[in-house]
Image (cartoon, rainbow, N blue to C red):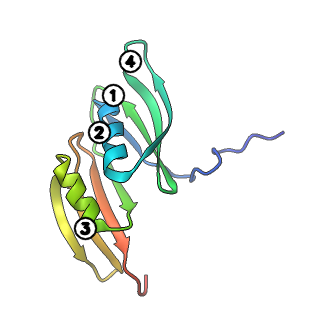
Amino acid sequence: MTVPYRPTGQAAVSPYLLVSDAAGLIAFLKQAFGGREISRIEETDGTVRHAAVAIDDSVVMVGSRKVTFQNSTHLYVPDVDETYRKCVALGAKPLSEPRTYDYCDRSAGIRDAFGNVWWLGTYVGGRV
C-alpha cells in the first residue's frame, strides 16, 4: 500500500503560522473562524510544537517558536463583514476595513494578537 504524499483532505499548500503562543493562536482560530483542531504535538512543558487546524476546507499548521515571523494568509469566509467584526472584537488590529474590489471579492485585513496578517475575502461574483 502506497502512502499519499499529503494527508487526505489537505491541500498541497498550507500556511504554517509560527508564533510565540501557538495555543493562544489555536484558540483564536477556533473562535474567530470556527476552526477545528485536527492534531497537536506538545513539548514536555506543554508548549505546542506543531498543530493542524481545519478551517472550512483548508488546513492551517501552527507551531510555537521564540521568534515570531511575519505571516500572511488569505482566507475565504461566508461573510467578510461579520468575520471582520468578530476578529476586531477578539482583539485583532484592523488593517483594511471591508470593501468590494474590482477583482470580485469583498475583502478586509486584520493583524491578530500573535502578529499574523489575515486577508479575509468573500467572492461576490463576476469575472475573476
Q: Which comes before the other along the chain, label 4 or label 3?
A: 4
The kind of residue tagged 2 is: Phe
The local crowd at label 2, few if under 14, some if 14 to 19, many if 20 or more residues have their Cα within 10 Å, is some
Whether tag 4 and tag 1 are in contact, CB under 8 A, the answer is no
CA–CA distance in space, label 3 to label 1:
31 Å
**Residue located at (43% from left, 26% from top):** 49
Q: Which comes before the other along the chain, label 4 or label 2?
A: 4
Is 16 drawn above or below residue 124 in the view shown?
above
Residue underneath mark 3: 81
Tell whether 14 sits left or right of 71. Answer: right
Q: Which comes before the other along the chain, label 4 or label 1?
A: 4
The kind of residue tagged 1 is: Arg
Q: Which comes before the other along the chain, label 3 or label 1?
A: 1
Residue 27: image quadrant is top left
The mark closer to the camera, 3 or 1, is: 3
Say which mark, if any, is on residue 65: 1
Residue underneath mark 2: 69
The kind of residue tagged 3 is: Asp
The local crowd at label 3, few if under 14, some if 14 to 19, many if 20 or more residues have their Cα within 10 Å, is some
